[in-house]
């Protein structure tokens, strides 16, 4: 990005200087002596660069962003706006779903100059109450209504702006105030084929938007037959922003109902990352050139190089936003910038964690040290009242806590020497999330409860259970969850955007497991007696190691397109639209999992591997055609509170406490950043939950949206969660399948449970699903494909991994591929 300040400016400046000093497109560092010399010589330069970058950032914040593109002509602007006006689209059709009482728009292209039309389209689903019918002859009257509908029809919507829809939670919406739900696809940061919007939110009164996006592994062929890669960062996000502009533009034109303000982005895993980034980067000029390139509406270049993000309709000029009012992100795989350090730190704090190789263990040790420095350099603070936690244990929530990590092997022997208030916050979050789960067990529907001898309780005994009884039974593992308590993330009633209650193809979840599933494998002794995963009623796991497919773009359940868009290595993972995608090395298509005992199959020597990292990282940080660094563009922490853009009003991040696809520190850091900028930010680490967990115990995306609407929209209904219904009939399971955590959880008082930090990280590492490093993977992992370019499908990109490889070359080189 253009001189964008990173969170750790001094450290990053030093790293960048090291990268430039040690490597270029043609230079190579192959010996430890050369590397050490380069690192030492760059120390003074790094400090100077940090000061210069800080001044440049300060200067930039006071200036107006400009583009390197040519000015948008009046003719071009008119062409874009006329082309993307739905009233001028001769191909758009509408389908009526009587069961859902909803009108669904066929897929239309959302930009004027699409690079891959199959991935740059949009579809919208609208509650039937807002639509009088379809005007087929242009006289403004409804010619086809819900009652007379027989087949898909071309025409314009006749919108009823007086109609109201009351949601399942009691919130009231109209055609002009209805929230718009933007489903961010990008499974595994990959491309998403255009799909028709699902009807899942129609009964809630929401407008549901499904959009495609370009992504990693996409290719294009020029007129001479030359193939090149496209779709790398930030294409996914730029396409989602373009889709938002398209829909908002047509709402302003009166072609579609819905609010232009109350937009909610949502998705899971890679889609959760994009839901978060979409909200965090709202209206940031860093992304304008990418939208202009494909002919997005409402973003243009003026003659002086500044941007114009307005449209004029009937003499009235409107700002056209590409951002979100709120977001619900499930297991967001972001920020990648810090992900390798954060996950290694979480692994390394568990003294019993069995690293696959000595090399990976040493990498985790050094990345942990870097993470401590990274966090401490930020001088983080948090208000206990904001997170509703008593972090310092003084009996109140009235303090502002300075957050830091400290190392003292004697003091913190059970966590490999690490402690401090930052980890006190981490532990407090874990304890509070278990407490929330216990406090809400009255919402458990259809569970089977057992006595201490393993016998199923009678219906009468279940009806008589108190909240404390259920909490005790849960801790002792005396339960079996119902199949109905599983399901997709987020949607009304707990199912996120699923059509007819079915998952779309490709929704097989995280590595070695399924959506909403806790980690596979024997969990004995971690903490003690954790022998079973909790959410066991899920679909069969993917055969692909470390696949990152998810249910983020679940509109695909009702997809029209059945086209085969497979790549050459079609035996690898499929995204949520059924497209296959590379998830590992350019040649092999596999990525290293937590069980990998080989440090590298690609590189025969450490020097060869180091050279690849140096050259790749140098190329990435040289910037793209617009002068931006893709890794930094995809770091939402850079944009939260940035004066160049807008923050969302609220965000809710839901992660599985037992998942292994991302460290819990990532969502924690995002929450801290959002809170510091005044955003209503909550994180939920769902106990027993795996990657992209189901909504459980009375929670749902609809409840979140309705509650936030009531909280922040003047005159809206204040929403409270409905009372739980007493379970009067026991489930039909024959044996308990719950995890017994009683050996390490203090539950003398079930209203104030507690456990140690060592127990928390041990619980976390039993869901480990990645090697170290887990994101910028040595033999290339999924995220390495995000930061490729037209010539290279995948590139290394982590300055932190490179820093460790360079600074500790002497020790690591001896361990690399040693078989130890």
Image (cartoon, helix red, strand yellow):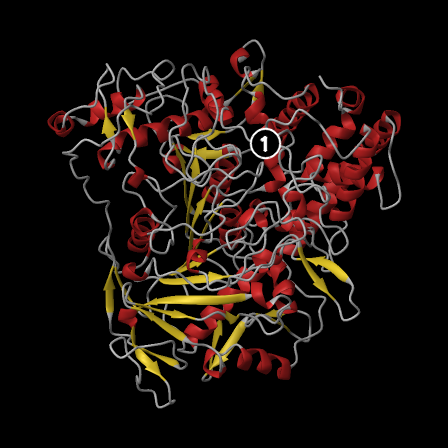
State the residue in front, 211 or 602.
602
Task: Give the image quarter of residue 454.
Answer: top left
Give the answer, above or below, for where 201 lies relative to 533: below
Task: Give the image quarter of residue 585.
Answer: top right
**SS type, badge 1:** loop
Q: Residue at x 26, y 26 (%)?
A: 734
Give the answer, above or below, for where 204 lies relative to 158: above
State the residue in front, 600 or 231.
600
The quarter of the image holding the C terminus is: top right
Q: Residue at x 42, y 76 (%)?
A: 93
- Let me know if residue 751 appears in the view: no
Q: Is residue 101 left or right of residue 11?
A: left
Q: Give the crowd class for mark 1: few <14, some 14-19, many >=20 residues within 10 Å.
A: many
Q: Is residue 163 left or right of residue 742?
A: left
Give the answer, above or below, for where 254 lies relative to 494: below
Image coords of residue 478 (percent x, y): 28, 22
Q: Is residue 184 left or right of residue 787?
A: left
Image coords of residue 787 (percent x, y): 68, 48
């Amino acid at each position: 990005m253009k001189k964008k300040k990173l969170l750790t400016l001094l450290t990053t400046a030093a790293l960048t200087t090291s990268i430039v000093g040690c490597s270029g497109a043609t230079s190579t560092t192959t010996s430890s002596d050369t590397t050490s010399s380069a690192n030492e010589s760059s120390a003074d330069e790094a400090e100077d660069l940090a000061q210069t970058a800080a001044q440049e950032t300060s200067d930039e914040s006071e200036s107006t962003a400009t583009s390197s593109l040519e000015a948008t002509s009046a003719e071009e602007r008119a062409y874009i706006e006329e082309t993307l006006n739905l009233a001028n689209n001769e191909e758009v059709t509408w389908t009526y779903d009587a069961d859902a009482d909803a009108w669904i728009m066929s897929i239309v292209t959302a930009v004027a100059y699409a690079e891959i039309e199959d991935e740059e389209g949009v579809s919208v689903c609208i509650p039937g109450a807002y639509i009088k019918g379809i005007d087929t002859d242009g006289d403004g009257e409804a010619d086809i209504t819900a009652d007379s509908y027989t087949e898909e029809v071309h025409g314009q919507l006749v919108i009823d702006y007086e109609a109201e829809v009351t949601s399942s939670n009691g919130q009231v919406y109209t055609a002009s105030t209805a929230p718009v739900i933007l489903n961010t696809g990008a499974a595994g940061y990959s491309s998403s084929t255009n799909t028709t919007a699902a009807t899942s939110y129609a009964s809630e009164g929401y407008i549901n938007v499904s959009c495609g996006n370009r992504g990693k592994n996409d290719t294009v062929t020029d007129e001479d037959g030359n193939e090149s890669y496209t779709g790398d960062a930030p294409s996914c996000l730029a396409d989602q922003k373009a889709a938002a502009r398209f829909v908002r533009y047509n709402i302003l034109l009166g072609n579609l109902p819905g609010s232009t303000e109350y937009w909610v982005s949502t998705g899971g895993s890679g889609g959760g990352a994009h839901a978060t980034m979409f909200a965090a980067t709202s209206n940031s000029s860093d992304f304008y050139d990418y939208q202009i390139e494909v002919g997005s509406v409402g973003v243009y270049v003026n003659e002086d190089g500044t941007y114009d993000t307005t449209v004029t309709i009937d003499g009235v000029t409107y700002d056209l936003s590409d951002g979100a009012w709120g977001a619900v992100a499930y297991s967001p795989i972001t920020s990648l910038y810090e992900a390798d350090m954060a996950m290694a730190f979480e692994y390394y704090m568990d003294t019993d964690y069995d690293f696959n190789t000595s090399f990976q263990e040493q990498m985790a040790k050094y990345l942990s040290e870097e993470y401590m420095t990274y966090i401490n350099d930020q001088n983080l603070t948090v208000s206990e009242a904001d997170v509703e936690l008593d972090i310092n244990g003084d009996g109140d929530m009235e303090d502002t806590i300075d957050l830091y990590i400290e190392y003292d092997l004697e003091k913190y022997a059970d966590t490999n020497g690490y402690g401090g208030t930052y980890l006190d916050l981490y532990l407090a979050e874990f304890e509070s999330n278990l407490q929330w789960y216990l406090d809400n067990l009255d919402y458990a529907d259809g569970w089977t409860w057992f006595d201490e001898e393993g016998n199923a309780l009678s219906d009468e005994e279940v009806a008589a259970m108190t909240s404390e009884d259920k909490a005790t039974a849960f801790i002792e593992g005396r339960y079996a969850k119902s199949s109905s308590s599983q399901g997709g993330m987020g949607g009304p009633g707990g199912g996120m955007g699923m059509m007819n209650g079915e998952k779309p193809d490709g929704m097989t979840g995280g590595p070695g497991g399924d959506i909403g599933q806790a980690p596979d494998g024997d969990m004995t002794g971690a903490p003690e007696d954790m022998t079973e995963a909790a959410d066991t009623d899920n679909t069969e796991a993917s055969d692909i190691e470390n696949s990152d497919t998810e249910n983020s773009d679940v509109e695909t359940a009702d997809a029209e397109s059945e086209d085969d868009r497979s790549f050459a290595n079609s035996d690898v993972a499929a995204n949520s639209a059924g497209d296959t995608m590379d998830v590992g090395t350019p040649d092999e298509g596999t990525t290293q999992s937590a069980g990998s005992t080989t440090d590298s199959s690609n590189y025969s020597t450490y020097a060869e591997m180091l050279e690849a990292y140096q050259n790749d990282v140098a190329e990435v940080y040289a910037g793209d055609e617009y002068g931006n660094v893709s890794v930094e563009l995809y770091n939402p922490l850079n944009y939260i509170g940035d004066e160049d853009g807008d923050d969302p009003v609220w965000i809710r991040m839901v992660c599985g406490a037992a998942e292994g696809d991302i460290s819990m520190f990532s969502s924690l850091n995002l929450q801290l950043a959002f809170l510091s900028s005044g955003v209503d930010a909550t994180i939920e680490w769902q106990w027993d939950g795996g990657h992209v967990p189901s909504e459980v115990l009375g929670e749902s995306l609809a409840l979140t949206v309705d509650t936030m609407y009531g909280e922040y929209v003047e005159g809206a209904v204040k929403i409270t969660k409905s009372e739980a219904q007493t379970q009067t009939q026991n489930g039909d399971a024959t044996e308990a399948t719950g995890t017994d955590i009683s050996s390490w959880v203090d539950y003398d008082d079930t209203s104030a449970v507690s456990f140690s930090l060592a127990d928390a990280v041990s619980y976390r590492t039993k869901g480990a699903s990645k090697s170290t490093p887990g994101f910028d993977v040595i033999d290339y992992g999924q995220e390495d494909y995000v930061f490729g370019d037209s010539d290279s499908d995948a590139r290394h990109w982590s300055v932190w991994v490179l820093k460790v490889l360079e600074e500790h070359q002497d020790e690591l080189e001896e361990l690399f591929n040693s078989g130890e």
